[in-house]
Amino acid sequence: MQKRTRQSLFLIVLILGVGLPGLVGIFVVQAQISDVQAGLIDPVFQSDSTPSPVLTSTSLPSQTPAGSPLSNPLSPIGISPLDIFAFIQAPNGYVPRPYVILTAFASISRSESVIIRGYIDSKEIICTDSPCAIYLDDGGARIIFRAFTTSGESSEEVISSVSVTRDDQGYRVTIDSISQFESFVDSCAVVWGVKDEENARWDSFVQFPYQINTQKTLHTLARNLILNGIVDTSACTSGGLSIGLDWPTTCGLETAASTMIEWQNQYDDYIWLAGKDHGIPPKILKTLIEVESQFWPGNSRFYLDEIGLGQINQLGIDVLLREDPSLYQEICPTLFSDCTLPYLSLDASQQDNIRGAVVSSMDATCPSCEYGLDLDIAKDSISIISRLLRANCQKVDDILKIPYKPDADVDAATATAAVATIAAGGSGPGADYEDYWRFTFLAYHSGISCFQISVNNTREAGLDVTWENLEAHIDCRGGGDYVNGVFDNLFAFDNYLYQAIDPGRVLVEPTIIATRTPVPTPTVYISSATVKVQAYIDRNGNNQPDATEWIDGMSVLLETSNNDEINKRTENGIVIFDMSGYRPRLDITVSLPGLYRSEHFILPETGEVVITFKFDQPTLPTRLP
């Protein structure tokens, strides 16, 4: 009866809305929010659903079986044991008062609170919350700190040196040195056996989570923030939404802007951590989440239920469990007493229970939570999204290694031409690193079977399996547009980078405790090493450079893992790079552009690194052809 009364009131107001459009919009939004809170309608509205192939199996269980991983909220599925991380960040540009920000987070989002303790020069500091603003004196400071939980876990110690300069425009704060360095292995590149030859910025591993903060206008996210009452747009005409509640108005977008930015960056710590743990470049992972859900961890329905930030369905989880036995071993003991059989050997109902437990662990909808969402579950689910993306990398590689066999209905001439053109078991000589990622996104979005059929279609046309060729032979609706849309976002990612710490925002300040105990001067983490690169052509075949064999004027490129590039040319076969001021343990790549010669090493604190490129004398013909 209550619902019928509300609907009648809605119709009356809608009729009056011809003359009172603003009033109608406000009432519509308020009525919808009331229904959401009352549980009468789905609290999540996804304007763009991802098409997904039908999985021939049973439906998603409404509840996770007893004893599932969800019974222990501090042990989410797919999450490694509790780790603590701490970082320091300097503001960009000029500020009226110099400061740095200390931040910390725990790898399990719903773990106990984290505090930061350390020293700024000789004064002890205690931050009871994160982020924490540390204000500095002129000249700068040495800052040493760790993050701690109340149960005793701690992060690695961070040792940093910060300088402060001042001119007419204000203060500039610079982090001169820092002891932190995180190594990264691109797990998909390893699986494929290819590497990024173009040195793209979208697959680089950032050293700190705040380096993937973005400032993007996301209409679906803004709509959900308004519709679910997270942003108050009652002052806007039509309540900040279109009459059909399909998109935000200009006023709605402007009102939601700051919350929209904060919302899209609240997951960055966990995106960075999942990327590091599972070998997925963080910008790729964040872009995938943006395209799938615009950072709103709700559920949608197309062919199957699609869950959370990654809009993952049971078909995707099936791929993950087949490719990641470690995840299966994490889940199985919580459901069954006997886990000796692998996932593929279970009967259909057992496989369904396993998949259901994983999917349920990623479902952030929560009727009893504020705004109907459990954001801790959403953050913890990012680890599984990264593992699923890695599983699709593996499946792509597996499919491309299957030798080509023409279908029975392909005529003999076409089959012969295709076999002659394509090397069995390979993707073709033209496929590069970017192509492989495009293949992976197609498999993630449209399913492994779609990718395999598209590969077969491309091979039957006698073409190498590159993205350019395969795109014209995709056998599933919207797959090509989806992949190209993902890459449009990747290419533009750095255009939207944003410093989320606003100097005008009220931040927690530390408790400062004066101490008489002198603090030892930390080790200065700045390298004094040099890199010597030499190139010669071994004309006499003695495997060592002689005076007449050095190559002059050869271009040499040195690249660091923090994206610095230095170009020099050899003189008398040698070029020397002075690495003074760079942080030790940086990943360094020295290459000869265009000649496909490169060497990788870790920058030492001192000494000389010698890199030698030897070219053999080309063999001359002994007779005329």
Image (spheres, grey):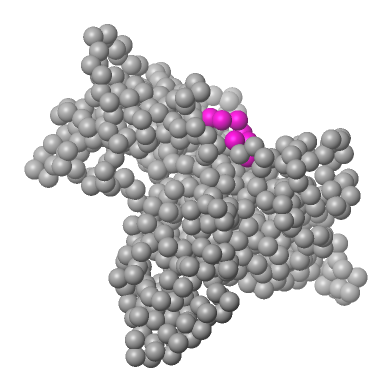
Residue 47: horizontal and vertical position, in percent?
Answer: 54, 71
Closer to us: 95 or 532: 95
**Residue 201 visible in the snapshot:** yes
Which quarter of the picture shows residue 495? bottom left
Residue 352 is situated, as x and y percent measured from the top left of the image, at 80, 52
Going by the picture, which residue comes out furthest to the left?
168
The one nearer the camera, 278 or 318, is 318
Q: Is residue 580 visible?
A: no
Q: Residue at x 72, y 48 (%)?
A: 64
The spot of residue 544 in percent (x, y) is 54, 24
Res 531 quadrant in image: top left
Front residue of 195 and 438: 438
Q: Is residue 75 magenta?
A: yes
Q: Which residues are magenta?
A: 74-83
SS assignment for the magenta stretch, majority: loop
**Residue 181, above or below 276:** above
**How many tags in the picture?**
0
Image side of residue 196 versus residue 164, left or right: right
Furthest toward the top, the residue is 517
In the figure, 603 relative to 490: above or below? Answer: above
Left or right: 223 as drawn, with respect to 56: left
In the drawing, does residue 536 fall left or right of residue 575?
right
Whether 530 is drawn above or below 566: the answer is: above
Query: In percent of the image, x 44 and y 54: which residue is there?
Result: 264
